[in-house]
Amino acid sequence: MYGAGDVRVEEIPDPTIVEPTDAIIRVTLACVCGSDLHPYHSMPASEDGTPMGHEAIGVVEEIGDDVTGVAVGDHVIVPFAYADNTCAICRDGFQTACAHGGFFSGAQAEKLRVPQASGTLVSFPADTDESLLPSLLTLSDVYLTGYHAASMAGVQPGQTVTVIGDGAVGLSAVLAAQQMGAGKIILMGRHQDRTDLGRQWGATDVVAERGEEGVAKVLELTGGEGSHVVLEAVGHMPAYEQSYGVVRAGGVISRVGVPQYEKAPVGFMSLFGKNVTLNGGPAPVRAYLEAAIPQVLDGTIDPGRVFDREVSLDDAPEGYRLMDSREALKVLVRP
C-alpha cells in the first residue's frame, strides 16, 4: 500500500531466513482484514509502500537451524502475531504481548517470512478437505478475534450478549457467544445479508438502529436492564458509546475492534457508575488454536462462511475496493 486507496501488486525478492528462529512459508490462502481498511482510508502517501496482510495459511518451505515443532512440508496456520510461546506473558495466554514477538505485515503475498516459527506456527493435517481451508484461515485472526472478545468477557450460559458491528469479527463474536451458551444474543448491525448470517450463527435479535435509538432498542429488548456482556467489534467512538449505553450494571464491555480514537470516556457516567468492567485487545490467537482446529475439522464451527468473495493475488486491489464499498463482507485472496 502506497497511501490511502493506493494498493499495488509488485514483484519483490523472495524472503529469506534472517534469524535461526525463522521459517519461510509458501502462502496458500490469505485475505483482506477489516483493519486493513484503516490505512486504506487514511495512510499518508509513501514512495516506499508497506507490504500488507497478516492472515495466512500455507506450507513450510524452509526453516532456520533453531526451529523445532514444525518441518518443511508442514501445512500451517500463521497467527497474525508472532511469539516465542515460552515467555511468562505467553504462558499467561497473551502471546500478542510476547517480549520477543511482534505483528506481521506482508501475508498478502506468495511467500512470507515468519519469525519465532517454533512458537508461532501451528500445523494441521495435510490431507484436510479443501473446503475447510477458508475456515482454518479464519483461525489466523478473524474468528479467534471474535472468540477472544467473548472469552475475555467470560460469557456464561444463559447470559444476554450484545455484539456491536456486523463485520466479519462481529459475526465471529456472535458464533463464539453461541458456542459459549449465551441465552440471548443481540446483534447491532444494519446490513441484512450480514445480519442474516448472524441469525444463522445464533443471534436472537437484530437491532439496525444506531446511537440513542439503538441503545433504546437494546434496553427495550432487555427489560430496561441492559446486556450482561457487550462485544464491541468496530473500533470507532460511536460503537464504544453504544457499548456503555447498553451494558448492564456489573456487566462487561470487551472490545476487539482496533480503536480509531485516542481517548474514551472512562468516567462516572460511562463505566464507574455501573461497576462495569472494560477489557479486550489484540487477540492472542495462538492461545486458542489447538482447541479451535479440531472444531473446524469436525464441523462444529464453520467460520469460513464470512468469506463471500475471492480474488487472485493480482486482483488484491479489487478485494480492498469490494470491502471498502461493502460489496463484500470479507475477501479471500488466493496467491
Image: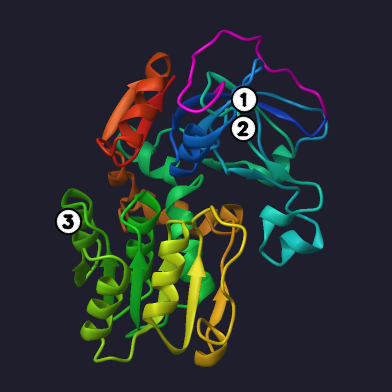
| Image location of residue 264, percent across then percent down | 57, 68
| Image location of residue 234, percent across then percent down | 43, 56
Q: Earlier in the sequence, mark 2 or mark 1?
A: 1
Marks 3 and 2, how far apart in space?
A: 32 Å
Q: What element carries label 1?
A: loop
What range of the chain is rendered magenta? 1-19
Pointer 1 local density, CA inside 10 Å: few below 14, some 14–19, many at least 20 = some
Could you say which is closer to the camera, residue 265 or residue 193? 265
The residue pinned by badge 2 equals 105
Task: Look at the picture and state if 309 lies above or below 6.
Answer: below
Q: Is mark 2 on a helix, strand or loop?
A: loop
| Image location of residue 3, percent across then percent down | 55, 25
Disc number lying in front (1 or 3):
1
Disc number lying in front (2 or 1):
1
Task: Look at the picture and state if 178 lies above or below 291.
Answer: below
Marks 2 and 1, how far apart in space?
A: 8 Å
Is residue 96 among what the camera can see? Answer: yes
**Structure colour scheme:** rainbow
Q: What element carries label 3?
A: helix
Q: Which residue is drawn at 70% across and 38% down?
A: 117
Checking the image for residue 206, the label placed there is none
Q: In which quarter of the image is residue 223?
A: bottom left
Checking the image for residue 196, the label placed there is 3
The kind of residue tagged 3 is Asp
Q: Earlier in the sequence, mark 3 or mark 2?
A: 2
The kind of residue tagged 1 is Thr
Magenta region includes residue 271: no
Could you say which is closer to the camera, residue 301 or residue 253? 253
Work out which quarter of the rendered image holds the C terminus and state it: top left
Checking the image for residue 50, the label placed there is 1
| Horizontal arrangement in the rendering, residue 46 relative to residue 220 (left or right) | right
The kind of residue tagged 2 is Ser
